[in-house]
């Protein structure tokens, strides 16, 4: 029995648009729920809800399978037994400093950073530190200080908090004092055992991209370090602590990163900030040496957590983001090594005029064991870095012992990881990492210790490096041990779900399959068969004490494929129908489908592929002869397709702000809305009211204000006067009102869609910095024409009578009895939707990468660093074109008398995303619902 609770009708009555009527019988039929299934709250179909849940599992599984934390616990600390060369270490991290920005010479052949250039030429060793994706501040600092590359789950906490506890050089030190950003320092203090890591941070509000001079952040750090040492002379407790061994001083310098985001790395501000950092490092190094009486027991390390692209962003894997400088000098560090030649794949040495000084490149995680070795603290327990011996100026014995300690420390992680996996896997199913079996581990350790005793230090070091490489391979092996098994489970479930969706579409929305009475006995056998399979899976997972997520991933295919097998009659009918088709038709249709899907796939890697697709779309009216019956509409379609095809060819990122183009777009939008208002005033529509005109006027005012705010904010930031408070208030008010004003407009098709466009454009203008501001206008124009073209196509194929779109009302377009059966052309229609959705993302200059988003886009709303807020606004910018496409597709569905549920099924199959379905629901809300404001009662005097 199909259960449909009474409150569904109650909710339907409440949310019914003004002037709408409720037909209970129609609504009863429209509440589509599968037989023998519980009703779903608020009328959501069971099938759609199941689809959302299944796709949520698919989405979460990717992060669970591929991005789980690599950390293990339970290892024993490992420390080099010989005395270290340094008592203390000073770590300078210039956040966002690129290697080339530091090492390159100015146009007059003078160094960008004179002091640091002098250090690498006369006193220390230098090279490039290679970072890994994601090139963000927290992962970079974790790699530097803890020695491992963190999992991306930390992004959920804004790269600030510890998703998993870990060890670090700071934790292993006697004392650590740190100065800098509140986004970085606290995470190492929280993860430390005991009370020996001290932090001194400025206010978070100081990290302002619109500030007059972001270099003040670095000046704050230098000034506070100086005052700290000065105060220690009158504080005996502090003075004694500073003179202990194993002391770390950490200076986090954020000014360069902030200036890079605000002004780009090639700007005067960025380069001047580098000079100020160079001067500050010189002063701090001199002060510390004097404080300790030039005892030669201080080691200095200067590096960066990540670089920055030319357009002022980071997060991805571009060389400008992953190549960071590393300069080490002081106690225990090698002096510059003169060479006649050295080979690297890049040409930086010649550009930097450093061909004769040996360049020592390292991985970013190698810096943690280097610092630990210099001051003699245990290597961080979770470190996967390899000690870069060429930086050390010490005996061969010390180097061999340090490498041995490094190897044992990584081997400890391998042993714990292997033990954990062995405990959760049946013995006959467990496959060990053969190159590093228990016997092999013992042989490596014994042989290395023997070499050290025999003073064969080079052989010992070589053997340690081999052991480290094998241990790292083994760690990766056990970390990804279940990946194939879980991946296959997800793939089987995914294929099953896609198959089931196709079968439901055929069964529900076509005349291909006839209803067949199921055999109760066969159904029972089938049910118990799949139930038995599920019990076996549960049994194996249970005895291996697997995580609960494994049960979800492994059991999901069971009910999905059970549902597929139950539809065997539909499969038989489909196979028979396909075999009856002509081979040429089948091959032709298959080729077209494959070509369309390939275009979508290639667009993720080559944006220009979308241009090819749009040009093919431009010829659609000619190919199908639609231009014969609607020449003007077909001509407009072709023109807008060609115009939209230009956007994917535009530069992806790296563009300079083009505020005049944004302002011109705002004025153009205002001009179009004026024509629309004039047309609305002249119309004799009996449903038009003064309230509708007021809403339209308010939206025009919002466009005008947005245009003004963009211009005013840009001028203010250019003059380094910060973000004006009035502009910030207007921006946030515009953002809030843009989600409400469309719901106050009439539900007539073009009026509602145009109202949605105006509201979203007012927000989009505030988030635009260049040519992308034009994109929603062109896209919406094509969407309006698409709605008309689909009407022509429907009439061309004789599927329906062409409705009058000018008076078409969303509020009265929900009668399920008017929906028709699916036609082959509906596949093309759904493909158009998916293609336009992909174009909505990549067409605005985005790429499938973190660093394709310009932080300058949010400067009308805020300039103080806030990762979640800024990320949310950037996501909103991406979503706006999606909403425009989804609303247009909603119009296509209702005007072509096609059930939105069946289209949702198509979207599930072809797009493979949850996002499309959410956009579909949002589009229905934006197009069909209307808010009613209280009206004043008119009193007439008599």
Image (spheres, grey):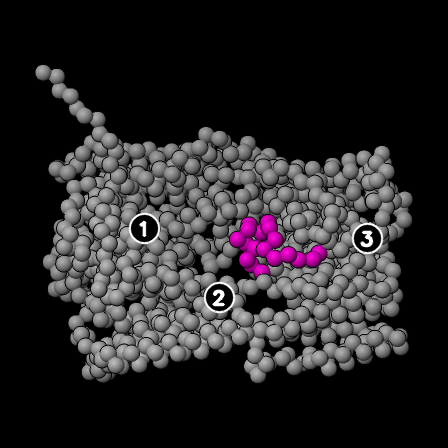
Q: Which residue is mark 1?
A: 922
Spatial CA distance of label 1 from label 2 is: 30 Å
Assess whether residue 297 is covered by the magenta stretch. no
Q: Quadrant of residue 919?
A: bottom left
Can residue 792 be seen here? The reply is no
Q: Which residue is mark 3?
A: 246
The spot of residue 760 in percent (x, y) is 35, 44
Viewer-proximal residue, 825 or 438? Answer: 438
Task: Examine the rendered structure and indicate whether residue 198 appears above or below residue 508.
Answer: above
10 Å neighbourhood of mark 1: few (<14), some, or many (≥20)? some
Spatial CA distance of label 2 from label 3 is: 43 Å
As drawn, the residue found furthest toward the top would be 942
| Range covered by the magenta-colored residues | 151-168
Viewer-proximal residue, 289 or 778? Answer: 289
**Which element type, helix, strand or loop, lies under badge 3?**
loop
- From the image, give the main secondary structure of the stretch colored magenta: loop
Residue plotted at (54% across, 54% down)? 155
For the N terminus, give its image quadrant.
Answer: bottom left
The spot of residue 61 in percent (x, y) is 47, 65
Residue plotted at (81% across, 39% down)? 229
Sequence-earlier tag: 2 or 3: 3
């Amino acid at each position: 029995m199909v259960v449909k609770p009474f409150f569904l009708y109650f909710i339907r009555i409440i949310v019914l648009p003004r002037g709408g009527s409720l037909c209970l019988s129609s609504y009863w039929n429209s509440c589509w729920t599968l037989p023998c299934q519980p009703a779903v709250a608020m009328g959501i179909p069971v099938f759609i809800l199941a689809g959302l849940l299944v796709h949520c599992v698919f989405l979460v599984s990717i992060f669970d399978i591929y991005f789980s934390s690599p950390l293990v616990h339970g290892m024993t600390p490992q420390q080099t037994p010989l005395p270290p060369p340094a008592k203390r270490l000073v770590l300078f991290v210039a956040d966002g400093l690129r290697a080339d920005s530091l090492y390159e010479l100015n146009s007059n052949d003078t160094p960008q950073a004179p002091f640091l250039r002098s250090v690498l030429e006369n006193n220390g060793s230098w090279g490039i530190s290679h970072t890994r994706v994601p090139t963000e501040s927290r992962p970079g600092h974790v790699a530097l200080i803890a020695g491992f590359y963190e999992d991306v789950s930390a992004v959920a906490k804004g790269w600030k908090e510890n998703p998993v506890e870990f060890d670090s050089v700071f934790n292993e030190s006697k004392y650590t004092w740190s100065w800098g950003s509140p986004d970085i320092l606290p995470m190492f203090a929280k993860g430390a055992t005991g009370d020996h890591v001290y932090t001194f941070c400025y206010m978070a509000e100081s990290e302002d991209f619109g500030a007059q001079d972001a270099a003040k952040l670095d000046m704050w750090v230098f000034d506070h370090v100086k005052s700290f040492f000065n105060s220690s002379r009158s504080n005996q407790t502090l003075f004694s602590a500073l003179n202990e061994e194993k002391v770390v001083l950490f200076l986090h310098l954020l000014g360069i990163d902030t200036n890079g985001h605000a002004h780009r790395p090639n700007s005067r501000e960025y380069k001047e900030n580098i000079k100020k950092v160079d001067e500050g490092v010189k002063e701090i190094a001199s002060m510390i040496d004097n404080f300790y009486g030039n005892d030669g027991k201080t080691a200095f390390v200067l590096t960066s957590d990540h670089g920055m692209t030319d357009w002022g962003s980071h997060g991805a894997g571009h060389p400008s983001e992953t190549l960071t400088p590393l300069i080490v000098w002081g106690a225990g560090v090698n002096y510059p090594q003169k060479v006649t030649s050295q080979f690297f794949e890049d040409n930086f040495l010649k550009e930097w005029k450093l061909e004769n000084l040996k360049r020592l490149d390292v991985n970013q995680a190698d810096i943690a064991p280097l610092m630990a070795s210099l001051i003699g603290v245990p290597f961080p327990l979770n470190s996967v870095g390899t000690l870069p011996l060429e930086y050390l100026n010490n005996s061969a014995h010390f180097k061999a012992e340090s490498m041995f300690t490094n190897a044992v420390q990584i081997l400890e992680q391998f042993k714990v990881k292997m033990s954990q996996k062995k405990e959760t896997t049946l013995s006959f199913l467990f496959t060990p990492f053969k190159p590093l079996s228990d016997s092999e581990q013992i042989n490596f350790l014994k042989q290395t210790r023997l070499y050290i005793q025999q003073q064969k230090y080079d052989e010992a070091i070589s053997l340690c490096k081999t052991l480290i490489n094998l241990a790292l391979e083994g760690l990766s092996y056990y970390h990804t041990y279940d990946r194939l098994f879980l991946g296959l489970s997800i793939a089987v479930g995914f294929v099953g779900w896609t198959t089931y969706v196709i079968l439901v579409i055929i069964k529900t929305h076509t005349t291909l399959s006839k209803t067949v009475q199921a055999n109760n006995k066969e159904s029972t056998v089938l049910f118990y068969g799949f139930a038995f399979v599920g019990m076996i899976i549960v049994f194996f997972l249970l005895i291996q004490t697997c995580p609960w997520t494994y049960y979800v991933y492994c059991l999901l295919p069971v009910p999905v494929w059970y549902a597929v097998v139950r539809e065997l009659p539909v499969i038989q009918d489909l196979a028979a129908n396909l075999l009856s088709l002509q081979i040429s038709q089948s091959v032709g249709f298959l080729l077209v489908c494959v070509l369309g899907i390939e275009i979508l796939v290639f667009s993720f890697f080559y944006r220009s592929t979308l241009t090819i697709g749009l040009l093919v779309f431009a010829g659609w009216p000619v190919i199908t002869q639609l231009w014969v019956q609607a020449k003007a509409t077909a001509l407009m379609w072709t023109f807008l397709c060609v115009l939209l095809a230009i956007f994917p060819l535009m530069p992806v990122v790296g563009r300079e702000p083009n505020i005049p183009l944004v302002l011109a777009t705002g004025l153009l939008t205002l001009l179009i809305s004026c024509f629309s208002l004039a047309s609305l005033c002249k119309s004799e529509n009996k449903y038009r009211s003064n309230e509708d005109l007021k809403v339209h006027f308010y939206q025009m005012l919002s466009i005008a204000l947005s245009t003004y705010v963009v211009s005013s904010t840009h001028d203010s930031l250019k003059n380094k006067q910060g973000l004006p408070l009035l502009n910030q208030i207007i921006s946030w008010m515009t953002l809030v009102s843009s989600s409400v004003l469309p719901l106050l407009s009439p539900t007539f098709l073009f009026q509602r869609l145009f109202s949605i466009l105006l509201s979203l454009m007012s927000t989009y203008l505030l988030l635009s910095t260049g040519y992308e501001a034009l994109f929603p206008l062109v896209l919406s124009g094509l969407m309006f024409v698409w709605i008309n073209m689909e009407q022509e196509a429907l009439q061309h194929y004789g599927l329906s009578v062409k409705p009058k779109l000018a008076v078409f009302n969303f509020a009265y377009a929900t009668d399920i009895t008017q929906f028709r059966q699916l036609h082959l052309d509906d596949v093309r229609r759904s493909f158009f939707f998916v293609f336009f959705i992909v174009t909505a993302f990549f067409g605005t200059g985005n790429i499938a990468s973190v660093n394709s988003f310009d932080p300058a886009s949010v400067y009308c709303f805020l300039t103080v660093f806030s990762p979640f807020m800024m990320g949310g606004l950037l996501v909103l910018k991406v979503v706006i074109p999606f909403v425009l496409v989804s609303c247009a597709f909603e119009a296509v569905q209702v005007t072509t008398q096609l059930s939105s549920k069946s289209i949702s099924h198509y979207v599930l199959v072809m797009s493979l995303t949850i996002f499309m379905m959410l956009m579909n629901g949002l589009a229905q809300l934006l197009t069909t619902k209307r808010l009613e404001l209280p009206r004043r009662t008119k009193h007439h005097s008599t």
